[in-house]
Amino acid sequence: MCFFAEFEGKKVVLKKLAHTSELKELGHFSGDFNEIKNKLVSDSSEHFKICNIDTAELFLQKLIPRDPQNIQTILYVNAEPILLEMFTSTANWHVPKFYGFCGRLSVMENCGSPLNSLDNCKWFDRAYVALQLLQAANNFTENHKDFRLYLTDISPDNIAVNENFKISFIDLEDAILIKKASNGKIHYTEHFYDESYSYSEKAICDSSISDHNLYAVCRAMFKKQSPNGKLTMYIGKRDFIDHISGVEPIDGVVVIDNDYKDRKIFGQVICSFRYGREEDEVMGLNFQKDLYLASEQVFPPPEKAIYYTKLQERLMKKLGENCYPFTFTLPPNTPASVTLQPGQEDEGQPCGVHYYVKLFVGENDTDRSHKRSAVMMAIRKIQYAPSKQGRQPCTVVRKDFMMSPGELELEVTLDKQLYHHGEKISVNICVRNNSNKVVKKIKAMVQQGVDVVLFQNGQYRTTVASLETQMPYSARFNVAKSDVSFCRFLSSNKDRRGIALDGQLKKQDTNLASTTLLASPDQRDAFGIIVSYAVKVKLYLGALGGELSAELPFVLMHPKPSVKNKGYTCRQSSRC
């Protein structure tokens, strides 16, 4: 159990080390170091393991002059506080700063959000996180002068990432400690199909060095298991790019339990379009449509040439004979992942377009799957900004008056057509008033347009940012207002229902939905939800004068990361 607080102006986490019932089970400790040493090796806790007597003896020497009973209690309840003192954050161990512990509470630095919430960031930031994970795995194995520490519960939930993309391992409770030795025996991790036990304590303790930390870090990728544990799906990423001309293939592998070797396994990619709230579904009414965009048999594999990606080859080599690849290709002109922001009181799945990869057991791909023997993982289909800017947007509108001479002219220009999320949008406004009318107010707005193509009247616009001036401008004047800037759209619209956001894999902060790019206007009906943006400038002339407005569309998207193309190798399938 954790509590969040502040200490000396910094965010900290208070972690409860044990429940009262766990302390009662410990009984009485004598505090004798020899007894502690022997019990650490022969009767380690189910979380923290010390490999041998030599390791235990050296480890206890590091803890002197602590109170022996205190040491014994902490080691048997939760060894994390002692490990955080030994492997400190100041020595680049990628762990939280440890402030101390008292009783059953330890206080440590709040290092940010869990790694599994890191879905919407640039490729270089992801690469930096991956580099730190590998460095941390190597440091735990190599960098302490006396010990090697092998973490046995490495998962995205137990790794935190802060706003600067610095990672920290926030749960050291489950670990194996061994004294450095030079007996020359090297342990290479083998895969165990039982997901709850994916390492061998004995093999690690019997060796001088193991690749366990590296294996566990690399294994902490996107995977999901069916409720009965018979199917485990692995994919390398959850964002797949729509290049307009085609979509990236969805590649991964499935590990099949031996009990299912006589069954058929099918895979599907499902596009789910929810256009109404779940709580309004009564008397059989359903506001969700599922499109099956790809479907094929995964096991037994088809007897044809199969193109393995490098990811699949590595996973198959590591996960063993029960690992089988799958690749799905989405048809062109499929909708992008979009979520319509729900209201504060709304419950259930939000409206929008969502994608899932599903693996299930059945006789054919149209069989109704059972929840126990099916696994489904959410993915996103996204579009990136074009590499080239379009023409600079500019428009001029004029208004004349029936009973007054002269005309009013409004010119609006944007500094460019394509903007990336987070960039400022600069608007140049020029007003030429050759009439005798008074402009009472000028208002500039950024509007998001959402077109739910399933409905005839499903179009609406929402103002996501606006600026205005109340200063009256008299007749026959010229005014140029340049560099009116807009930014931080989402922060001021977090509670507004109906705002279109980029598709969400979890309940996490995201950004406004990117502009939907269409190869042809005829494809609108296939895209489910079309998102567009425009800057609108409006002049208010009073009750009798009316209004004059100008509108300029622009494109708002994420920049395309520079990633090398995947390599493929072609092999004839020999497994059936």
Image: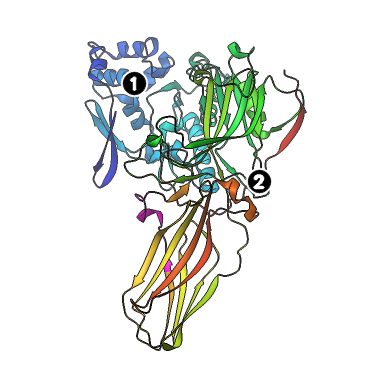
Q: Is residue 172 above or below residue 262?
A: below
Q: Is residue 431 above or below residue 40?
A: below
Is 513 placed left or right of 38 in the picture? right
Residue 219, x across and y down, in percent: 54, 28
Residue 67 is covered by the magenta coloring: no
Q: Residue at label 1?
A: 60
Label 1 vs 2, first from the N-terminus: 1
Of the 4 image quadrants, the one containing the C terminus is top right
Q: Main secondary structure of the magenta part?
A: loop
Residue 138, x across and y down, in percent: 51, 33
Taking depth in this image into account, of 61 and 205 the one nearest to the observer is 205
Taking depth in this image into account, of 457 and 77 the one nearest to the observer is 457
Which mark lies nearer to you, 1 or 2? 2
Which residue is depicted at the point 55% across and 23% down? 232
Q: Residue at label 2?
A: 564
**Callout 1 amino acid:** Leu
Residue 245, x across and y down, in percent: 68, 49
Residue 489 is covered by the magenta coloring: yes
Which residue is depicted at the point 38% across and 29% down? 171
Is 496 placed left or right of 192 in the picture? left
Of the 4 image quadrants, the one containing the N terminus is top left
| Whether residue 333 can be seen here | yes
